[in-house]
Image (spheres, helix red, strand yellow):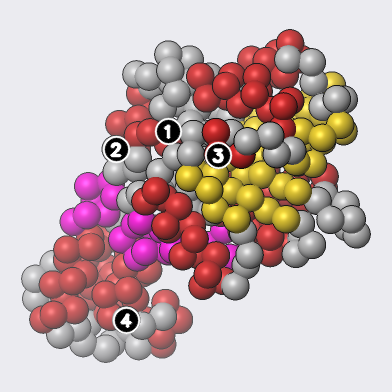
């Protein structure tokens, strides 16, 4: 990439090096401290040596598989711009399926207590607090570093969420909720897809030989924290829907249902607790 004189030339060289067009444009805008729309109107603008060096470094990291969100430090999720660091998973569009379902479960007028387990960047909790401001949202994560990212997002967005550090339900005592959501680790040990996820925190990805350990723990413990008629909504791998539905049924949940993600894959399974 050395000697690239203009915005247009820099983008062509990035594409020739195998970087996707959108990634190349976003990284160049970040390196130049400009917007992507500015690049479109200034494709003949020259790159100074410092900007060129920043861009080259970003391209090398992206080519090594580092997520774009880590490189630019943010990710859009359900209409919110979230700060993202390597301490948290990058929020995925498919997780918006879980948020949309949760929004349907929340009554439009009555206050509701909502719990987000394994909150990471705070994506789910903050999306729910944003769209249902009357809900009292609590979010839990075992990682102090992740909670710091989530709390920072909440403060910057002006959204009131209670952040608690601990292992799943541990910091909650006997508290109960009308809705519990979780996007827990659900990748199996040894899954070949892990090779492409090496930059993200493994503890937020992997959960036992079948990827079901965290899901099983949540399902078994959830009844003690749900009000009668409350819902438990879980994100999972696209091949895990039957297993998660079975866990819910065996634990005494009713109205077990699975929702599909943007790509049509079974991505979330939820159920109601009769009490």
Out of 137 and 82, give the one closest to the viewer: 137
Task: Indicate the position of residue 167 as horizontal and vertical percent values.
Answer: 49, 34
Is residue 268 in view from this perspective?
A: no
> Residue drawn 42% across and 77% down?
36
Residue extent of the magenta highlight: 60-85
> Residue drawn 53% across and 48% down?
164
- Left or right, 116 with respect to 188, comes to right
The secondary element bearing badge 2 is classed as: loop
- Residue located beneath label 3 in the image: 171
Residue placed furthest toward the front: 173
Q: CA distance from mark 2 to mark 3?
A: 30 Å
Label 4 crowd bin: few (<14), some (14–19), many (20+), radius 10 Å: few
Label 2 crowd bin: few (<14), some (14–19), many (20+), radius 10 Å: few
Asked if the magenta segment contains residue 70, the reply would be yes
Is residue 237 in view from this perspective?
A: yes
Residue 82 vs 34, above or below: the answer is: above
The secondary element bearing badge 3 is classed as: helix
> Residue drawn 43% across and 58% down?
149
Asked if the magenta segment contains residue 21, the reply would be no
Closest to the camera, between mark 4 and mark 3, is 3
Identify the disc placed on residue 198. 2
Closest to the camera, between mark 2 and mark 1, is 1
Closest to the camera, between mark 1 and mark 3, is 3
Task: Indicate the position of residue 7 as horizontal and vertical percent values.
Answer: 27, 79
């Amino acid at each position: 990439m050395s000697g690239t004189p203009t915005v247009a030339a820099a983008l062509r060289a990035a594409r020739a090096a195998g970087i996707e067009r959108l990634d190349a444009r976003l990284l160049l805008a970040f390196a130049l401290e400009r917007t992507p729309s500015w690049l479109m109107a200034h494709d003949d603008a020259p790159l100074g040596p410092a900007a060129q060096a920043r861009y080259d470094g970003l391209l090398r990291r992206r080519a090594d598989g580092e997520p774009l969100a880590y490189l630019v430090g943010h990710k859009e999720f359900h209409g919110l711009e979230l700060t993202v660091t390597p301490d948290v998973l990058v929020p995925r569009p498919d997780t918006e399926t879980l948020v949309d379902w949760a929004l349907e479960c929340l009554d439009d007028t009555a206050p509701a207590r909502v719990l987000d387990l394994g909150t990471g960047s705070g994506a789910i909790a903050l999306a729910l607090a944003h769209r249902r401001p009357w809900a009292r949202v609590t979010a839990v994560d075992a990682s102090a570093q992740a909670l710091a990212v989530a709390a920072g997002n909440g403060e910057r967005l002006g959204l009131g969420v209670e952040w608690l550090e601990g292992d799943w339900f541990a910091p909650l005592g006997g508290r109960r909720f009308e809705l519990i959501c979780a996007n827990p680790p659900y990748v199996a040990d040894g899954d070949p897809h892990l090779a492409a996820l090496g930059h993200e925190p493994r503890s937020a990805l992997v959960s036992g030989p079948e990827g079901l350990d965290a899901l099983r723990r949540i399902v078994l413990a959830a009844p003690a924290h749900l009000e009668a008629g409350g819902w438990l909504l879980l994100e999972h791998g696209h091949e895990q829907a039957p297993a998660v539905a079975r866990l819910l049924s065996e634990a005494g949940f009713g109205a077990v249902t699975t929702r599909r993600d943007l790509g049509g894959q079974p991505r979330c399974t939820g159920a109601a607790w009769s009490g």
